[in-house]
């Protein structure tokens, strides 16, 4: 592989460029008019404007992405996360164009992208799933009937969904009836598929995922877990590894289930199997993300492995670089997603980063998409940077993250930095005693 096009933007484009430079692979950065000032563009070997700010006219425009790749003689396309990363039709088009797609085969993306089909596959593979729909709920009446059978609260979900869009906890029938049409409409808008289904809510659960990588020879390994239980609007805000909740025995059982899930779809490349873990240590499949995760640096810091390099090597047809017994972890890592948003309401706060002063701290990795003077526009996810702190112990990683946020200076827009300062000091978080309801309980107290 000599030249790779990155079908994405911001920090994940910068992240992929870093590994490609180390591997001697040239990169093509693409950008919309809204992103022409961002730093990732000048880091790439080549950069190409691909359209107007709305993502459908640029980063989601498959024809333009493919034409650019062919025009500038790319060998491969890395989709990053979001946008086209889990679009099976796009992956097919890339392969049909004679290019390498840095991700799984289209059939695996398609199988895991349909959440109902994924549930059925996992059930057949013996991976535990939460009580819920065996098929799409075509009407609100069918959703209500199923919810009455499995008991409230239930989670209403979009069959083709992701990122928390189209999801809502329904405590009773009245809420479910009200939410059904609204979420189906959102699902149709965002995913082109209005199908909805319901699952039993695991109360006081933890959202824990297993990172796996598979090659085309049938080998699958795991690179341990990430605990992603600190969430707002069903979207992750803090991720860490190791999980302060898991025992070694439970970790081993979940990793074994994740590998079984990957083998069930003949998976190849990096992926993440997400579980909800109940207080009694029972765990259930939520979904599989068929791409690189936003929170992959947490895994890289505890294992010392470069997941983007693993993705590229596997996509080139090479076997996995390591066997399971050769993969180990050391220390602890915590990632905080820094967003341009109000720390109380979580509403986006786009604008110009008049001051963006990042302290230099040992043990801190910063994956950033913006620098001082850039503007966070309203067109895309408002994540500014990922701050990942690591240390020999969890306490050390927390202390480093806290010191970073207390020293960091941002002016011009609101960010959720003050929330991190509060959370990293909070006794329940410091003791590791938290669930997916941590932020909701803070807001309701």
Image: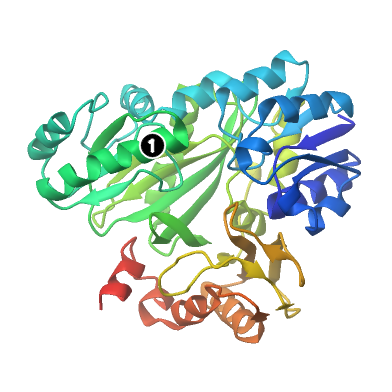
Residue 138 shows in this picture: yes
Say if 35 sits above or below 8 in the image.
below
Give the x, y percent position of residue 309.
75, 41
Q: Residue furthest top?
A: 96
Give the x, y percent position of residue 339.
56, 65
- Location of residue 279 (image quadrant): bottom left
Which residue is depicted at the point 48% across and 33% down?
259
Q: Which residue is mark 1?
A: 187
Q: Residue furthest front?
A: 52
Give the x, y percent position of residue 358.
72, 77
Total numbered circles: 1
Name the one closer to the observer, 280 or 354: 354
Name the one closer to the observer, 362 or 161: 161
State left or right for residue 322 relative to residue 212.
right
Which residue is depicted at the point 66% across and 36% down?
57
Quadrant that contains the C terminus? bottom left
Which residue is depicted at the point 51% across and 62% down?
240
- Location of residue 361 (image quadrant): bottom right
State left or right for residue 89 relative to residue 442.
right
Say if 396 sits above or below 95 in the image.
below
- Location of residue 138 (image quadrant): top left
Name the one closer to the observer, 443 or 237: 443
Q: Secondary structure at mark 1?
A: helix
Give the x, y percent position of residue 96.
71, 13
Crowdedness near tag 1: few (<14), some (14–19) or many (≥20) residues, C-alpha within 10 Å: many
Q: How is the image coloured?
A: rainbow
Residue 321 shows in this picture: no
State left or right for residue 223 relative to residue 67.
left
């Amino acid at each position: 592989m000599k030249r790779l096009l990155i079908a994405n933007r911001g920090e994940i484009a910068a992240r992929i460029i870093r590994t490609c430079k180390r591997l001697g692979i040239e990169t093509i950065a693409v950008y919309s008019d809204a992103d022409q000032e961002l730093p990732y563009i000048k880091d790439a070997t080549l950069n190409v404007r691909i359209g107007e700010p709305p993502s459908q006219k640029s980063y989601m425009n498959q024809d333009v992405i493919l034409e650019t790749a062919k025009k500038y003689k790319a060998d491969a396309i890395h989709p990053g996360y979001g946008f086209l990363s889990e679009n099976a039709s796009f992956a097919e088009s890339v392969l049909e164009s004679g290019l390498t797609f840095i991700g799984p085969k289209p059939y695996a993306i398609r199988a895991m992208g349909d959440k109902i089909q994924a549930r059925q596959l996992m059930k057949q593979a013996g991976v535990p799933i939460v009580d819920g729909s065996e098929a799409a709920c075509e009407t609100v009446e069918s959703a209500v009937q199923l919810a009455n059978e499995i008991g409230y609260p239930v989670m209403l979900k979009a069959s083709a969904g992701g990122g928390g869009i189209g999801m809502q906890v329904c405590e009773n029938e009245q809420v479910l009836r009200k939410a059904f049409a609204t979420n189906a409409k959102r699902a149709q808008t965002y995913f082109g598929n209005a199908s909805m289904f319901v699952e039993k809510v695991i109360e006081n659960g933890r959202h824990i995922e297993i990172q796996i990588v598979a090659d085309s020879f049938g080998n699958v390994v795991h690179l341990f877990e990430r605990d992603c239980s600190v969430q707002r609007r069903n979207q992750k805000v803090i991720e860490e590894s190791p999980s302060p909740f898991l025992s070694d025995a439970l970790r081993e059982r979940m990793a074994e289930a994740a590998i079984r899930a990957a083998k069930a779809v003949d998976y190849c490349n990096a992926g993440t199997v997400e579980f909800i873990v109940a207080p009694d240590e029972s765990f259930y499949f939520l979904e599989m993300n068929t791409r690189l995760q936003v929170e992959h640096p947490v895994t890289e810091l505890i294992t010392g492995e470069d997941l983007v390099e693993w993705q590229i090597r596997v996509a080139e047809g090479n076997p996995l670089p390591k066997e399971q017994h050769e993969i180990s972890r050391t220390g602890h890592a915590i990632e905080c997603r820094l967003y341009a948003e109000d720390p109380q309401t979580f509403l986006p706060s786009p604008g110009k980063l008049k001051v963006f002063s990042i302290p230099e701290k040992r043990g801190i990795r910063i994956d950033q998409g913006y620098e001082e003077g850039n503007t966070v526009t309203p067109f895309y996810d408002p994540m500014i940077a990922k701050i990942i702190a690591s240390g020999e112990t969890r306490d050390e990683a927390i202390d480093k993250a806290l010191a970073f946020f207390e020293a960091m200076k941002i002016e011009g827009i609101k960010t959720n930095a003050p929330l991190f300062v509060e959370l990293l000091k909070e006794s329940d978080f410091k003791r590791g005693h938290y669930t997916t309801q941590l932020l909701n309980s803070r807001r309701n107290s």
